Amino acid sequence: MSLPADFMGRIFYILQKYGVSFLRGAGNTLLIALVSTLVGCIIGFAVGIVQTIPSERKDQPVRWALLCVARFLLNVYVEVFRGTPMMVQAMFIYYGASMLFGINMSMWQAALLIVSINTGAYMAETVRGGILSIDLGQTEGAKAIGMTHVQTMLFVILPQALRNIMPQIGNNLIINIKDTCVLSVIGVVELFYTTKGVAGAYYTYFEAFTVAMVIYFILTFGCSRLLRWWESRMDGPDSYELYDLATTDTLAHTTGMYSYPSKPKAGTQNSDIRDGGAVI
């Protein structure tokens, strides 16, 4: 079957002949992006928490010195990976690990490692900003009831910070879906790498990359909608007064939902104390 002359005909011909390859490439792209974003978030939370641990010179000297060294190393990591392109990082890590340390990583291992540590560097600053955005009174209140720093982070600060940084987590996922194309320089068979092969087979670059662009848009738009839905679920209801707990609380009258008991009728022995308790 010869290649059709019209544009749409060539599009359908490419899809018919290489549709499975496009789907496989898109699946690899999505898998790398999802796993790397998850691992990157874990790295980012760990780095962000360490960077926000309170420390002063009057603390134990050893603890203060260790925190200073750890923060210096983590700042170097963050600045290096935020200040260099991912494509350069991919080449440096993939070939450098083999030459310097004798570590021969597979394409998948290299892809997940590179995107994860790159995402972790960006998430570290996001998490640090999210933690610092929480009102200081939250930390002081937690310490006032005897909670340790770890307990305060796990149960008070991080749940609130997570909601604040959810949009950035979604943004990093979308960026990773698109930026996995740079991994083609080390031979990772993702969507961009697959598209180059399809385009070179018949010299249909415009048609092949049109298909790739549509697939990328479907992936990013779908993830964006799912994350927006997750954010709305994390917000909870607009008013917690909808729950029965609020109506049974002894302080619920402060919200305007409490109903005072009606005044006793004339002739009864139980008059409302607010009316002086007079017996009629």
Image (cartoon, rainbow, N blue to C red):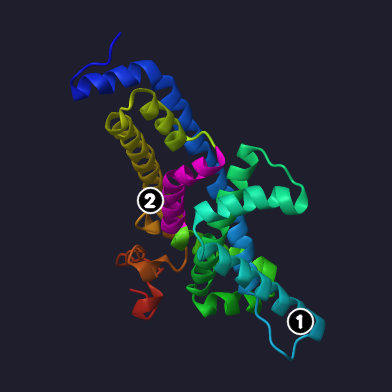
Q: Which residues are magenta?
A: 166-187
Residue 181 shown in magenta: yes
Return the x and y of residue 8 as percentages of the image width and height.
21, 23
Quarter of image, res 41: bottom right
Residue in the foreground of this view, choosing between 93 and 245: 93
Looking at the rendered image, the quarter that the N terminus falls into is top left
Quarter of image, res 62: bottom right
**Is 141 placed above or below 84 here?**
below
Residue in the foreground of this view, choosing between 275 and 4: 4
**Is 47 placed above or below 146 here?**
above
Q: Is residue 23 toward the left or the right of residue 262 in the image?
A: right
Q: Earlier in the sequence, mark 1 or mark 2?
A: 1
Residue 61 shown in magenta: no
Residue beneath disc 2: 232
**Which amino acid lies under the numbered mark 1 shown in the image of this protein?**
Ala
Residue beneath disc 1: 65
Q: Is residue 164 toward the left or the right of residue 4 in the image?
A: right
Determine the residue positioned at 57% across, 58% down. Answer: 120
Name the dominant secondary structure of the magenta segment.
Answer: helix
Q: Disc 1 or disc 2, which is closer to the eye?
A: 1
Determine the residue positioned at 48% across, 46% down. Answer: 182
Query: How many marks can you see?
Result: 2
Looking at the rendered image, the quarter that the C terminus falls into is bottom left
